[in-house]
Image (cartoon, grey):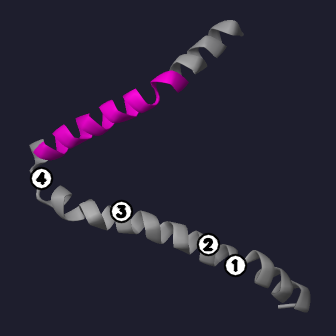
Amino acid sequence: MSFLDKILKGFLGDKNAKDLKEVKKVVAKIKAVEASIQQLSDDGLRQKTAEFKEKLKTATASISSQVETAKRAN
């Protein structure tokens, strides 16, 4: 590693360390709900999937309408 790389790394930080920090946050969230998901039956998992799909549909409704509007405009 060159001297310039060491200086830049000191100021900007390590990209891999930053990425790892973000991944660890996601893993912690997954582990927090893991036990409750493991206890679900097959039917319970199907119901949870339907809930997630509805949440996604609700969360993306405005974006979806904007895309449709843009498609019609072209």
Q: Are marks 2 and 1 in contact (CB under 8 Å)?
A: yes
Q: Are marks 4 and 2 in contact (CB under 8 Å)?
A: no
What element does badge 3 sit on? helix
Where 67 sits versus 51, above or below? above
The amino acid at mark 3 is: Lys
For the point 68% across and 73% down, the residue is 15
Label 4 Cα crowd, 10 Å radius (few <14 / some 14-19 / many 20+) = few
Alpha-carbon span between mark 4 and mark 1: 40 Å
> Which residue position holds label 4?
40
Alpha-carbon span between mark 3 and mark 2: 17 Å
Residue at the farthest front position = 11
Alpha-carbon span between mark 4 and mark 2: 34 Å
> Which residue position holds label 1?
14
The picture places residue 20, in percent across and down from the top left corner, at 55, 74
Where 40 sits versus 35, above or below? above
Q: Earlier in the sequence, mark 3 or mark 1?
A: 1
Instruction: Give the residues in magenta.
Output: 44-63
The amino acid at mark 2 is: Lys
> Which residue position holds label 3?
29
User: Between 25 and 49, which is closer to the camera in this rendering?
Assistant: 25
